[in-house]
Amino acid sequence: MTVGGFRSPQARAEYYAAYDRGFAALPAPTEECDVPTAFGTARVYRFGEPGPAPVVLLPGRAGTTIMWEPNLRAFVAGGPVYALDLIGEPGRSEQTAPIRNTDDQAAWLGTVFTTLDLRNVHLVGYSFGGWLAANLAVRAPDRLASLTLIDPVQTFAGFPIPLLARTALTLVPGIRRWARQSFLAWVSDGAEVDPDDPVATVIDEGMRTYRIVLPTPRLFTDVQLRGIKVPVLALIAGRSVMHDAQRAAARARELLPDARVELWPTATHAIAGESAAEVNTRVRGFLTEIEVPR
């Protein structure tokens, strides 16, 4: 299998039922479209009316647009917001060709920006979406006004071995369901996952029903990080299981030319949901601080 896809037609139907229930928790989008790229179609939702310097949201793995439920209303209050389901992952986007490397990842996202004529973008990425956002800033920064990275993976520090081991367990037949639920609880440092939470449900269903076939994100080099010239806000969760938080924050401070790097000591990788009000205030404050009209 060279492209991602659902494990069966029944799995697809079950996932979309969960997706639609989760999506109902969001404010209604003002527009939705499927943008064709060389690697498949990207589902994009616009919230609010079109305008200059939009915010573009890239979710964490299997999170889809739904994972922004705790943050979306606050972001939309500041101006237009575009949210993407990622190609190659569960969601309403559809992969049709292999994504083989970091250039391919930047290429499909760049096509979305070009097709929708998105300029002076405030790009916000969470977890894997943070890596994807930084990857675009490294390879095709021309359309960006700023970069916000919320506990990004493989960006400032690499994956630890326990994470790789637990991820592998989610793929083992017979224990996948237990391993998925254990993994989600571990990511939030043991906090009980609410079965009615739309974000947790869509992630769990995505992991259950969809095979992701994507290259492992590559850790950025010192040269690449030094080359990111746009203003950056990096929120690093001190109790994140995705990396060594202290090392990640130190490397970001050392290498990024124009960065506000914040280590939130008590936050887990679920920072955008568990500390939603604080994250929303900080992101909007950063956009105001850099004085780009919205």
Image (tube, grey):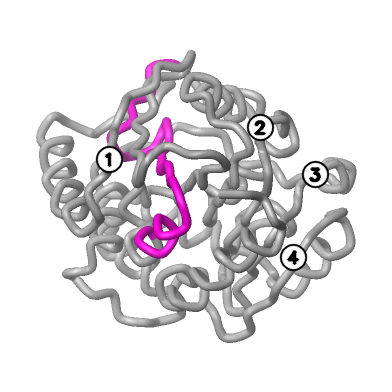
Viewer-nearest of discs 2 and 1: 1
SS at circle 1? loop
Region of the chain picked out in magenta, as a range: 72-97
Q: How many numbered marks have been drawn onto this rendered protein structure?
A: 4
Q: Which label number is shown at residue 248?
A: 4
Q: Is residue 84 above or below residue 93?
A: below
Q: Which residue is mark 3?
A: 228
CA separation, marks 4 and 2? 26 Å
Q: Earlier in the sequence, mark 4 or mark 2?
A: 2
Q: Residues within 10 Å of mark 1 (few under 14, many from 20)?
A: few
Q: Is residue 205 visible?
A: yes
CA separation, marks 3 and 4? 16 Å
Q: Of residues 237 and 158, which is closer to you in this image?
A: 237
Residue at the location (23% across, 61% down)?
A: 198
Q: Which residue is mark 1?
A: 30
Task: Give residue 102's quadrant in the image.
Answer: top right
Task: Give residue 191's quadrant in the image.
Answer: bottom left
Q: Which label number is shown at residue 143?
A: 2
Q: Of residues 288 and 127, which is closer to you in this image?
A: 288
Tell whether 223 sits left or right of 128.
right
